[in-house]
Image (tube, rainbow, N blue to C red):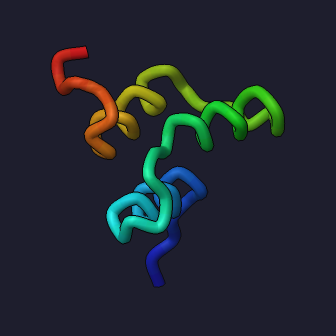
Amino acid sequence: MNVIGILGILLIAKRRRLIPTIQPLMDDLIFKAGFRVNQILYLDILKTAEEIDENQ
């Protein structure tokens, strides 16, 4: 059995074109729901989702 978290689910949803972008949803999780995400993980997710430049 593979276990993935909510951020993994968001990446899958974007790859399947179920959602256009991940960043607004991650921001809602952080600022509205109190979800805690390390800054490095936050940037890694956005890079993986190709929502920011790899050099950032």
Question: Residue 56's spot in the image, x, y percent?
Answer: 26, 15
What residue is shown at x 22% (from left), y 24% (from top)? 53
| Furthest residue in direction left, as rendered | 55
Question: Residue 27's spot in the image, x, y percent?
Answer: 64, 31
Say if 38 sits above or below 28 in the image.
Answer: above
- The answer to which quarter of the image holds residue 21 is top left
Q: Is residue 13 left or right of residue 27?
A: left
| Furthest residue in direction front, as rendered | 20
What residue is shown at x 50% (from left), y 56% (from top)? 10
Say if 9 sits above or below 37 in the image.
Answer: below
Say if 30 sits above or below 11 in the image.
Answer: above
- The answer to which quarter of the image holds residue 47 is top left
Question: Residue 9's spot in the image, x, y percent?
Answer: 51, 63
| Furthest residue in direction top, as rendered | 56
Say if 55 sits above or below 11 in the image.
Answer: above
| Furthest residue in direction bottom, as rendered | 1
Q: Nearer the viewer, residue 50 or 40?
A: 50
What residue is shown at x 44% (from left), y 32% (from top)? 41
Question: Residue 32's spot in the image, x, y percent?
Answer: 82, 33
What residue is shown at x 61% (from left), y 43% (from top)? 25
Q: Is residue 39 left or right of residue 47?
A: right
